[in-house]
Amino acid sequence: RKWQRLKPEGRGAPASEKAVGWSWSNNAYFFSGWSDNKGEDENAKDFQWEEEDVRGSVSGGGRGGGWHNALTCYCPKSNSWHWPKTKGRPPSPRAAAASAVVGASAFVFGGRGRRGRMDDLHCLHLSSLTWTEVASCSWPEPWTATSALRPLPRALHPLTHLPGTSLLAL
């Protein structure tokens, strides 16, 4: 096998790092991330942006960057990008979240945003493209458990679907 550079039509996901992705129905979806290109994306009206607070930064005077909650879809059959129009309230801007697909639902857990690491859980019902908040962010003190059943806030972690109805976050 050999790597091949694709030249898809349409506007792709914002240039960012720590996005999360999944596949469903022969398409690849990408959600959120951290970027330093806030105003440079023509689709910026289609997602929310939270600026990083760089006032207290050690390096000082940097351009900074921020978190977004853009949802994009790559369709390999047509070799094109799409910006799905969703219903419901999407998760807040973040990077380094985790996702798992269960049937026709994509779950997004945690990540990091302007306020810090998160422990919220959201579901995107893929057939209707409707967001549902399953568990809101509790914003506990760092490393303080809020429940024996709820994972601590985290970023850069896996989320895996276990047979039945369970999701496992490490």
Image: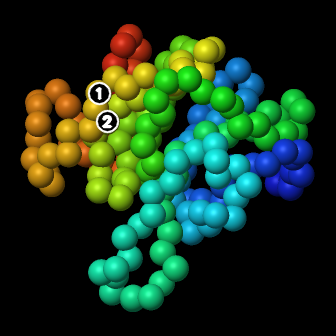
> In the drawing, does residue 98 fall left or right of residue 36?
left
Q: CB of mark 1 within 8 Å of CB of mark 2?
A: yes
Q: Is residue 85 above or below residue 153?
A: above
Residue 161 seen in the current view: no
Residue neighbourhood size for the residue with mark 2, other residues' Cα within 10 Å, grouped as few (<14), some (14–19), many (≥20)? many
How far across and down, in percent of the image, does residue 157 sit? 38, 47
Mark 1 and mark 2 lie on one chain; the one further toward the N terminus is 2
Residue drawn at 89 percent across, 45 percent down: 9
* Residue 120 tag number: 2
**What is the CA distance from the residue labelled 1 to the residue labelled 2?**
5 Å
Q: Which mark is residue 149?
A: none
The image position of residue 29, as x and y in percent, is 64, 36
Residue 41 visible in rendering: yes
Would you say 97 lies left or right of 10 here?
A: left
Name which residue type carries label 2.
Asp
Residue 143, placed above or below residue 152: below
Secondary structure under the numbered disc 2 in the rendered image: strand
Q: Is residue 100 left or right of residue 26?
A: left
Taking 161 as reference, is 45 above or below it?
below
Question: Residue 91 in the image: x percent, y percent?
Answer: 44, 37
Tag on residue 135?
1
How many labels sit on residues?
A: 2
Using the image as rendered, state which of residue 114 and residue 7 is in the foreground.
Answer: 114
